[in-house]
Image (tube, rainbow, N blue to C red):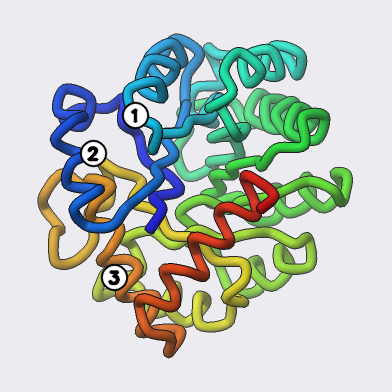
């Protein structure tokens, strides 16, 4: 299994990272991707990716942070090139659910991240909330070589179907295990197996039956199990499929 999106720089994961990784290995998680969200937090990401060969990282500015962290395409490229274990651009995108950042600043930041990902030919990790139309239009009008990963996908089925036309990948989080997530479960039933990844978004969004606890990468197995039920594929086979998808997207293998 691969946890395609976690935040190992957040507590309680950061202070217990060796125990977290030990539980990962025990449960069969062999890679984790720890995600950058702020400029000031990136040195911590660089420190973490060097702690174990199973950890990879990204660089990006979360849409909530774009009021304070405005960064150019060239600056993004420089950060990505600083370490060979930094393999993606993001987390970037649009979040109009909260008014944490100005919409225009979010859009400018998103486009800078897109252009950096295109120049580097690495995946773009996209956060989209209450911004389906705007997210789609920006992605649609970008170069068709863009490698799109919709992280913690919770969008509508029509949005998903349009994103499939852009060759997007979709990462399922613990939200698909929640009892009230029928619409999202139905959406994932319609998505092609060769476009699916799994993630925890830990320490947030712990899946059933761990809700109420701090999430961690080893819990990705619960998301895998739920997704296997939705797709009528056994967990072992889906583990291989999602692992192959991750490696194809991030390592071209």
* 3D distance between C-alphas at marks 2 and 1: 8 Å
Whether the residues at callouts 2 and 3 have beta carbons within 8 Å, the answer is: no
Asked if labels 1 and 2 touch by Cβ distance under 8 angstroms, the answer is yes
Alpha carbons under labels 2 and 3: distance apart: 23 Å
In terms of secondary structure, where does tag 1 sit?
Answer: loop
**Location of residue 168 in the rendering, given as x and y in whole percent from the top left corner:** 69, 59
- The answer to which of 207 and 217 lies nearer the viewer is 217
Residue 104 falls in which quadrant of the image?
top right
Q: Nearer the viewer, residue 214 or 68?
A: 214
- In the image, which disc is placed on residue 177? 3
**134 left or right, relative to 235:** right
Residue 169: percent from left, percent from top: 62, 59
Which sits in the foreground, 117 or 177? 117
Q: In the image, residue 121 lies at what x, y percent?
A: 77, 37
Q: Earlier in the sequence, mark 2 or mark 3?
A: 2
Q: Name the residue under label 1.
A: 52
Q: In which quarter of the image is residue 41?
A: top left
According to the image, label 2 marks what residue?
21
């Amino acid at each position: 299994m691969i946890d395609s999106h976690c935040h190992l720089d957040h507590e309680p994961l950061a202070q217990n990272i060796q125990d977290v990784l030990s539980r990962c290995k025990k449960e069969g998680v062999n890679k984790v991707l720890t995600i950058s969200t702020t400029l000031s937090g990136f040195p911590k990401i660089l420190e973490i990716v060097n702690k174990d060969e199973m950890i990879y990282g990204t660089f990006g500015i979360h849409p909530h942070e774009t009021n304070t962290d405005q960064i150019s395409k060239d600056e993004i490229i420089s950060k990505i090139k600083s370490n060979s274990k930094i393999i993606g651009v993001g987390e970037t995108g649009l979040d109009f659910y909260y008014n944490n950042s100005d919409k225009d600043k979010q859009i400018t930041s998103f486009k800078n991240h897109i252009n950096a990902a295109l120049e580097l030919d690495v995946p773009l990790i996209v956060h989209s909330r209450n911004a389906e139309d705007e997210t789609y239009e920006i992605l649609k009008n970008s170069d068709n070589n863009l490698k799109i990963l919709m992280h913690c996908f919770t969008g509508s089925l029509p949005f998903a179907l349009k994103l499939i036309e852009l060759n997007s990948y979709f990462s399922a989080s613990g939200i698909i295990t929640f009892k009230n997530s029928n619409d999202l479960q139905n959406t994932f039933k319609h998505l092609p197996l060769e476009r699916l990844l799994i993630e925890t978004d830990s320490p947030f969004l712990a899946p059933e039956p761990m809700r109420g606890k701090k999430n961690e990468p080893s819990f990705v197995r619960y998301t895998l199990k739920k997704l296997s039920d939705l797709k009528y594929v056994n967990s072992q086979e889906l583990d291989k499929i999602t692992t192959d998808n991750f490696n194809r997207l991030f390592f071209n293998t």
